[in-house]
Amino acid sequence: MDEIKSSDVVLFFLKIGAFFLGLLLILFFITSAVTGISMFNEEIMKLLTVLFGITVFIVIILALALVGAIFGLSKSPVRNTGSMVVKDNALKYEYRDENSRKRKKSFSLTNIDRYLNDYKEMYLPDDLRLYKADPNKKSSAINLMVETSDKRKLSLKDLYFEDADQYNRICAFLDRISDKDEIDLEFRLRKYVAQENILYAGEDAVRTFKELRKEISDKTIKAQIDRTIENIRKTSTCIDQIDRDDQMRKLYDNYMDMLVEILKNYATLEKHEKRPEELNKAKEKLLQTFELINSAFDALISGKEEEKIEELEADAQSLEDIRKEETAVANKE
């Protein structure tokens, strides 16, 4: 429901009062014309005063009823608010599909509720913790509480109005595990949390690569960026089949950060470096980095990751040296 302004309500009832007053005056004018009795006759004026008082009383009652209805609606425990739904054992959230279009989805909290009834709390990505404000009530956006890493506590409803993106991320994770039974969640919850953190890192990396791609003109580098984005997306779709979560985490937390920084430095050099030989040298090192990381992605996706990950780890110092060297060169420009 759209927000109703108090000034609009007052104006509405003033119009109603004016309408009834006008109606009474017209009625008395017609009566006077038909009967020949003056409108200003004492008895007529008394009757007019009584009827006007009754009209004002009715208008006041209607106004109070409307205000009560609006107040009751605002306090209703079950309602839709944008992409949030306040309802027992259900949540609604917003996400972007593969074409970056906004979509809305609702899902059941039945399994989550059962888990919280038995284990009292649930660990979430980003070092968050989920629990029920009232253990005796069903899970909902009001009853589900989130505790942050700095011990701040707020309901999912409050989180929605404070940080809708964070709310949507939590809901997306809960939706992903909502079909898991209590035993599955008991033994695999930490794995699901670790995977979700990897997915978050992948989403952030894709956004960064797309922004950097706009700043770079070299077609070979652009092609490598596209290849890396595609590998991140492939990894996201088959993450349940990849058993080496520790290797995935290293790839994202360590080597992906190095690649992003080297790419940023190259973008700076491409804009300002006037010596072709220096730019070609930086490009060669960047392509080397891309090849190492994309080969590791390919290995993880194909299930033959051990050799490539070990190769990447063996070259970690080389990547760090490239990062430091490129950073120093870029800072001179």
Image (cartoon, helix red, strand yellow):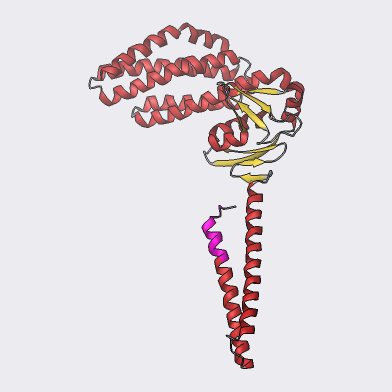
Residue 327: x, y in percent? Answer: 33, 16
Magenta region includes residue 67: no
Specify whether residue 60 is in view.
Answer: yes
In the image, 74: left or right of 138?
Answer: left
Q: Main secondary structure of the magenta part?
A: helix
Question: Based on the displayed image, in which of its 4 quarters is residue 173 positioned?
Answer: top right
Residue 37: x, y in percent? Answer: 62, 91
Q: Looking at the image, which residue is at 60% across and 21% down?
A: 195
Nearer the observer, 128 or 93: 128
Residue 193: x, y in percent? Answer: 62, 21
Question: Based on the displayed image, in which of its 4 quarters is residue 10 positioned?
Answer: bottom right
Position of the C terminus by quadrant: top left
Question: Based on the displayed image, in which of its 4 quarters is residue 144 positioned?
Answer: top right
Give the magenta range. Answer: 2-13
Nearer the observer, 223 or 68: 68
Magenta region includes residue 12: yes
Q: Looking at the image, which residue is at 30% across and 18% down?
A: 330
Q: Residue furthest left?
A: 274
Residue 187: x, y in percent? Answer: 72, 17
Relative to 107, is 255 above or below? above
In the image, 227: left or right of 146?
Answer: left
In the image, 266: left or right of 242?
Answer: left
Q: How many marks?
A: 0
Specify whether residue 229 is in view.
Answer: no
In the image, 194: left or right of 324?
Answer: right
